[in-house]
Image: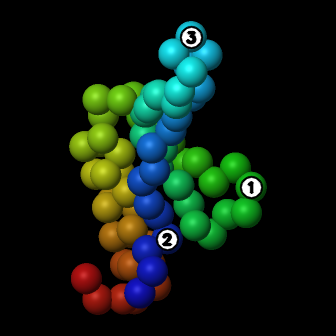
Amino acid sequence: MKKRYWVRWRTVFDSTAGRLQQEGWDVCDGNKFDKIVVQSFGLREKGQAEGLCKLLNSIEEENHGLSK
């Protein structure tokens, strides 16, 4: 079963270095078409992003009567 929420990294273009740099993490909602980001986290907050993602997916499973 595909999970509704997932974590992705967020990048910005560094024009002085001429490359992409990772800026942080986003928790995203797969059921939305536009504005899919639920919450944004800083670069060193990957654990919090993954924790929120797991929590939201657990709530989604519980609300739809799926086993964990």
Q: Which residue is mark 3?
A: 16
Which residue sits furthest right? 34
Q: Nearer the viewer, residue 53 or 9?
A: 9
Which residue was labeled with disc 1? Answer: 34
Please state, as top left, top right, bottom left or bottom right, where the N terminus lies in the image: bottom left
Task: Give the SS element for disc 2.
Answer: loop
In this view, which residue lies farthest toward the top?
16
Residue sitting at x 70%, y 49%:
35
Residue 48, how many percent across, how many down?
Answer: 29, 42
Give the labeled residue for mark 2: 4
In the rendered structure, the answer to whether residue 30 lies left or right of residue 64 reads right
Element at badge 3? loop
Q: Residue at x 55, y 48 (%)?
A: 38
Q: Please, what is the three-letter code of the amino acid marked with disc 3?
A: Thr
Residue 4 in percent (x, y) is at 49, 71
Q: Earlier in the sequence, mark 2 or mark 1?
A: 2
Kindly state the secondary structure of the residue where label 1 is placed. Answer: loop
